[in-house]
Amino acid sequence: MINIFEVNETNKMIEQENLDVRTITMGISLLDCIDSDPARLNEKIYDKITKKAEKLVSTGEEISMEYGIPIVNKRISVTPIALIGGAACRSAEDFAAIARTLDRAAKTVGVNFIGGYSALVSKGMTPAEELLIRSIPQALAETERVCSSVNVGSTRTGINMDAVKLMGEIVLETAKATREQDSLGCAKLVVFCNAPDDNPFMAGAFHGVTEADCIINVGVSGPGVVKTALQKARGADFETLCETIKRTAFKVTRVGQLVAQEASRALNVPFGIVDLSLAPTPAVGDSVAEILEEMGLEKVGAPGTTAALALLNDQVKKGGVMASTAVGGLSGAFIPVSEDQGMIDAVSAGALTLEKLEAMTCVCSVGLDMIAIPGDTKASTIAGIIADETAIGMINQKTTAVRVIPVIGKGVGETVEFGGLLGYAPIMPVNGFSCEAFIERGGRIPAPIHSFKN
């Protein structure tokens, strides 16, 4: 049971340390919407989403008012659309029409993002999945709230290098399709390895086929709370540091558990998971980078950064897993450059490079996230970045992802402004040596030896 003392204990965290519930995400299965007629399919999708999520936003606002806990976002995830549209869609335009339907449904119920314009192609692509992937640039250019994700690899299946090559091209095409908005479409597109079925965070959220018809997943966040706690442990040994992070993560996750329980009860929808990730924002004092610097780094990117991040990620999970009946999603520490003022400052100071960020992804929750790169970066280079990150996930049996934004018309030394939670970012240099011959090989990188566990 969660008691009122625990709720009161969070007041200071909320008022002074940027504690919030980052998102309540309603997962909705669209499997029963499948139809061979495109018009009927779109009608069924719109009707189910608007019916199931009719009270999602108002319920979130009521919980926020009752407990004084900021709930920043209310979102929806749906079954990967490549599966739902396979029977009806004969062209990329048919899939883009579904994206427009999702966008219209999201606006009707008032959520800020809807995720699940997705394809899971870690071992191969069906014709429908390839059509959806090829429709992504158009879909993201024509919608405001739709988020897209593609899973191109896993520890169990290896890496689909044909999909990796295609995604390099699609990321660049999406950047060009949204060039008037500084290539903003790429901020709503993420390429995964080992994508989780129950992730509440965008842009990678989708409703896995093993999930119930409708569920509530909650994502909490509290980098500012952890940083403040660590200020009281300056100079202490690593055991004390770990204990401080673990205790703080427990308290933060309890807030998420409370919100999840209340939302589940009010909406009469089963509770899924609490994702206990530390998700930063551009707000001052709400930075994962500042936590790492509080541990003793002059700037993120300095020697010791990967070790500090590994410690943080592990202790967040250890503290959070005891605070909720079901922990899932990504859970740990995010390192999105544009959404974290400390990361932005480290890049601007020359302390943090793309290569160091890649090393850090070996031990963080996700991967290369919200990184702006020059608009003239080749599609094969983007595919190489995706392949590297996917390999890290495959070998290490963890989720990794790439969300890079080639900003058309801009280069190293310039900045790009995305606004809101997406923040702003300096354009980071990319290694100019070619990997095109490697990417052009095609086929599949097989699963690693330790994947065989049956």
Image: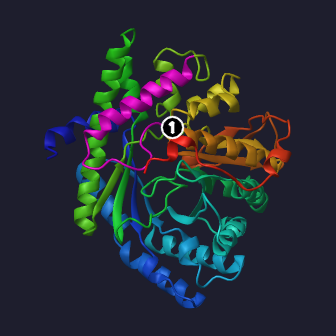
Name the residue tied to disc 1.
283
**Horizontal and vertical percent for residue 378?**
83, 48
The magenta stretch spans residue 317: yes
Residue for point 68% across, 54% down = 186
Q: Quadrant of residue 183?
A: bottom right
Answer whether residue 129 is visible to the viewer in this image: yes
**Horizontal and vertical percent for residue 174?**
73, 59
Seen in the picture, residue 31 relative to 226 is either above or below; the reply is below
Q: Residue furthest top?
A: 235
Q: Quadrant of residue 373?
A: top right
| Near-viewer residue (48 or 5) | 48
The magenta stretch spans residue 311: yes
Helix, strand or loop at label 1? It is loop
Disc 1: CA contacts within 10 A as few (<14), some (14-19) or many (>=20): some
Seen in the picture, residue 26 relative to 362 is either above or below; the reply is below
Start-end of magenta stretch: 304-333
| Near-viewer residue (227 or 155) | 155
